[in-house]
Amino acid sequence: FHRHKRDKTHTKKIHASIVLTPPSYPTNTTNYPSSNTTTMSDDHDILQQIQSNTIETLHLSESYDRYVKTPQEFADAMNANTSIRSVIFDGDFLGATVAKERAVIVSCLGNLPHLETVTLADSLVMMGVCMTNLVKNSPSVTTLTLKQCVLQGIPSDFDLFTAALETNTTLKEIRLIQCTVPNDEVQFDTVVDGIQSGGIAIDVSS
């Protein structure tokens, strides 16, 4: 984590953990493990695959207009899905969106009833909207990874996120890989302390 370094590891054995690690996933998206994966080659029937509940891993890397007409159309399809267990959004899928579009796309993940793992990469991420809605609403997510993301928000947005973590009973691990916090008013140590106060074990490595 580039903006703040800690000189010691905090350990508190409770029910979840947050991990900041320098290693990154392969840049070749085909190296992600998948099962029944939807990628760019399937872009023309993405809605059908989501609506027909025939996929478990949804990996999208192209801009959303390759798959659907609007973010809301995507969200409506996702809200009716019961098969997806893993989501990977990288490349231009989130990176080429504006804030309102990202909010719709990421927030709808919290409505997937069997979602277990989420990886969001190469994008701006609004902590007070996107991440808070995802963590607060998801009934099943266990692992959340943010890779090469800019974590946006004012201190109160990060407070909303940590408050949502306190109410989530399924999340086991959060990974932040090569992420940055551009707002100088947000002190990452304060965010970590806020998460710890909610009974979440934290493992921080530079």
Image: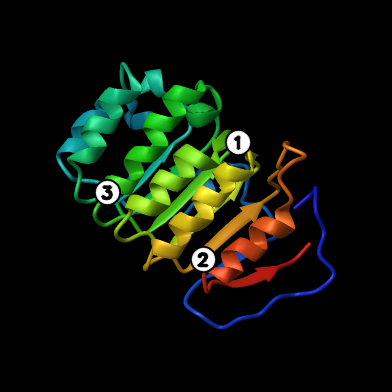
**Mark 2 neighbour density, 10 Å: few (under 14) some (14–19) many (20 or more):** many
Label 3: state its secondary structure.
loop
**Res. 205 image quadrant:** bottom right
Picture coordinates of residue 151 (x, y %)? 62, 41
Q: Confirm or deny contact between disc 2 and disc 3 (CB under 8 A).
A: no
Q: Residue at x 80, y 74 (%)?
A: 8
Q: Nearer the viewer, mark 1 or mark 3?
A: 3
Seen at 71% across and 45% down, the residue is 186
Question: Which of 171/168 is in front?
Answer: 168
> Where is the C terminus found, in terms of image quarters?
bottom right
Q: Amino acid at mark 1?
A: Asp
Point out the residue furthest to the bottom here: 13
**10 Å neighbourhood of mark 1: few (<14), some, or many (≥20)?**
many
Q: Residue at x 58, y 44 (%)?
A: 156
CA gap, disc 1 to disc 3?
Answer: 22 Å
Which residue is under mark 3?
Answer: 112
Disc 2 vs disc 1: Cβ atoms closer than 8 Å? no
If you read the primary sequence from the N terminus, does the residue marked by circle 2 or circle 1 appear first? 1
* Residue 11 seen by the camera: yes
Task: Kindly identify which residue carries mark 2.
Answer: 173
Q: Does residue 132 appear to the left or right of 127 in the view shown?
A: left
Residue type indicated by callout 3: Leu
Residue 142 in sight here: no
Q: Could you tell me how many numbered marks the image carries?
A: 3
* Local secondary structure at mark 1: loop
Which label is found at residue 122?
1
User: Where in the figure is residue 90, as x and y percent of width and height?
Assistant: 52, 37
**Residue 76, relative to residue 139: is it above or below?**
above
Nearer to us: label 2 or label 1 = 2
